[in-house]
Image (tube, rainbow, N blue to C red):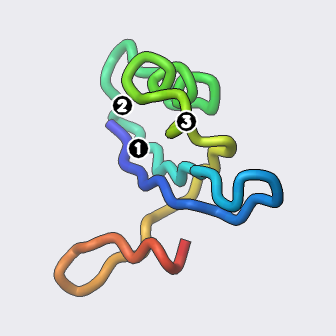
Amino acid sequence: MAEGAVVGIPDERRNEVPKAFVVPTPDAEPGVDVTEDGIREFFLDNVAAYKHPRKVEFIDGLPRTTSGKIQKYKL
C-alpha cells in the first residue's frame, strides 16, 4: 500500500494543475503498480480527466501536523 496527496501547482495556461506526491511502501499489495505509469493508470480508471495529475513525485514521507493531517502547503 502507498499513501499520497494531490495538490494544485501553478500553471501558465490553466492557472493551476494537479500534482501527486506519493510515498511508496515496501508492503505494496499484489497487483498494485506503484510507479509513475501505475499511478497515472489508477487516475485514468478512477478520476475525472481534468483531475489527473500532470506530474507525479515520489517522496519519503508526507509532512503532517501533530494531529496527523497532511500539510499540503508544505508540498
Q: State the CA–CA distance, disc 3 to disc 1.
A: 27 Å
Q: Position of residue 58 (x, y in %)?
A: 59, 50
Label 3: how many Cα within 10 Å (few below 14, some 14–19, many 20+): few
Residue type marked 2: Ala
Q: Position of residue 34 (x, y in %)?
A: 50, 30
Q: Quadrant of the C terminus?
A: bottom right
Label 1: how many Cα within 10 Å (few below 14, some 14–19, many 20+): few
Q: Quadrant of residue 62?
A: bottom left
Circles 3 and 1: CB atoms closer than 8 Å: no
Q: Is residue 21 left or right of residue 68?
A: right
Q: Secondary structure at mark 2?
A: loop
Q: Quadrant of the N terminus?
A: top left
Circles 2 and 1: CB atoms closer than 8 Å: yes
Picture layout, residue 37 above or below residue 19? above
Picture layout, residue 3 above or below residue 61? above
Give the number of the disc on residue 25.
1
* N-term mark: 3 or 2: 2
Residue type marked 3: Tyr
Residue type marked 1: Thr
Residue under label 3, please give it: 50
* N-term mark: 3 or 1: 1
Q: Secondary structure at mark 3?
A: helix
Residue under label 2, please give it: 28
Q: Position of residue 27 (x, y in %)?
A: 33, 35
Q: Nearer the viewer, mark 3 or mark 2?
A: 3
Q: Position of residue 49 (x, y in %)?
A: 53, 28
- Residue at the image position 29 percent from the left and 83 percent from the top: 65
Q: Quadrant of residue 53?
A: top right
- Residue at the image position 70 percent from the left and 61 percent from the top: 15
